[in-house]
Image (cartoon, grey):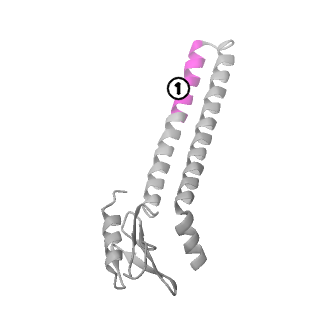
């Protein structure tokens, strides 16, 4: 568990960048598919025009327009569902590096808050001392912890809660 937390701490920004690249790639994939379907529709309509009456072409266009309107409404519903789902994902973060011991050099200890849109999540704290490093995790529900928080943990919790999602 400690190695996983160290991995997240050391490579957290790279993980966020990787997730962003994956999301943008998926977005472009969806746009490309949409453009191909529009091209197919354009090709279909051009071939139909040669042998059909104007009334038949307009009726076909009206039907296709209704189908597209239906699809757009479905996409709007899916977007709303995704918006609701993402409210439960990490959206608010704060990080504080500090030196808890006067006889140690550098800010090698840290506290990080990871919260969703409802201020639920966790605070990870790492205290670095000469004899080792200790990592603590405290759950947060509606902006409060069941466990006592250190001053640095209170600071990152407040900072994260003030972040706009």
Whole-percent x, y for residue 4 in the image: 59, 74
Which residue lies at the image location 62% right of the left edge and 36% below the top edge? 32
Dividing the picture into quadrants, the one containing residue 101 is bottom left
Whole-percent x, y for residue 156 in the image: 35, 70
Magenta segment:
54-67
> Is 17 located above or below residue 25 in the figure?
below
Judging by the rendered image, the residue that carries numbered circle 1 is 62
Left or right of 47 on screen, residue 143: left
> Is 53 located above or below residue 69 in the figure?
above
Element class at badge 1:
helix
Which residue lies at the image location 62% right of the left edge and 41% below the top edge? 29
How many labels were placed on the picture?
1
> Is 50 located above or below residue 116 in the figure?
above
Q: Nearer the viewer, residue 92 or 40?
A: 92
Dividing the picture into quadrants, the one containing residue 91 is bottom left
Q: Main secondary structure of the magenta part?
A: helix
Which residue lies at the image location 56% right of the left edge and 16% below the top edge? 55
Name the quadrant of the N terminus.
bottom right
Q: Nearer the viewer, residue 75 or 82?
A: 82
Q: Nearer the viewer, residue 154 or 56?
A: 154
Whole-percent x, y for residue 159 in the image: 32, 65
12 in the magenta segment: no
């Amino acid at each position: 568990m400690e190695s996983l937390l160290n991995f997240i701490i050391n490579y957290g920004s790279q993980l966020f960048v990787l997730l962003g690249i994956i999301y943008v790639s998926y977005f472009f994939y969806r746009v490309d598919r949409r453009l191909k379907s529009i091209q197919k529709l354009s090709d279909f309509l051009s071939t139909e025009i040669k042998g059909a009456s104007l009334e038949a072409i307009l009726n076909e266009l009206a039907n296709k327009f209704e189908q597209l309107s239906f699809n757009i409404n479905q996409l709007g519903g899916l977007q709303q569902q995704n918006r609701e789902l993402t409210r439960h994902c990490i959206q608010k973060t704060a990080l504080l590096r500090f030196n808890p011991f006067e006889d140690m050099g550098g800010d090698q200890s840290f506290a990080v808050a990871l919260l969703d849109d409802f201020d639920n999540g966790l605070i990870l704290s790492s205290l670095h001392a000469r004899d080792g490093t200790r990592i603590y995790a405290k759950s947060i529900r509606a902006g409060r912890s069941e466990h006592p928080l250190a001053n640095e943990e209170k600071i990152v919790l407040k900072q994260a809660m003030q972040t706009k999602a």
